[in-house]
Amino acid sequence: MNIVNVHEAKTHLSRLLARVEAGEEIVIARRGRPIARVSRIEGERQRRTPGRDRGRIVIHPDFDDPIPEWDPDYSHPEDPLFREPG
């Protein structure tokens, strides 16, 4: 584990990240006091597979039909945005 100060970390970030990718752990310190640890994230990200959820999701043919009991001209009096019609 290597300790570098904030100025060095800002100046040589690309080099430090290359060292981290190689498996090294780096601690960043301010005035000699450790404040952060930079380490490699293990494991590869899984690639997304199109159609992976096929058969799990159902979209009914009427999903975008208007809701019959909903009247866009009606607001409940307790609604904070309620305005008297007229």
Image (cartoon, rainbow, N blue to C red):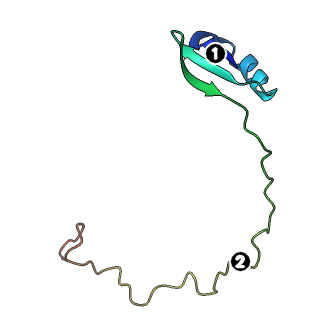
The vertical placement of 49 against 27, above or below, is: below
Mark-to-mark CA distance, 1 and 2 = 47 Å
Mark 1 lies on residue: 9
How many numbered marks are there? 2
N-term-proximal mark, 1 vs 2: 1
Left or right: residue 53 versus residue 70 is right
Badge 1, how many Cα within 10 Å: few under 14, some, many 20+?
some
Left or right: residue 79 versus residue 46 is left
Mark 2 lies on residue: 56
* Residue 8 percent coordinates (x, y): 63, 10
* Residue 25 percent coordinates (x, y): 71, 25
The vertical placement of 67 against 57, above or below, is: below
- Please report the residue visible at 77 percent of the width from the left and 75 percent of the height from the top: 54
The vertical placement of 18 against 82, above or below, is: above
Q: Nearer the viewer, residue 22 or 56?
A: 22
Q: Amino acid at mark 2?
A: Arg
Left or right: residue 83 versus residue 37 is left
The vertical placement of 52 against 71, above or below, is: above
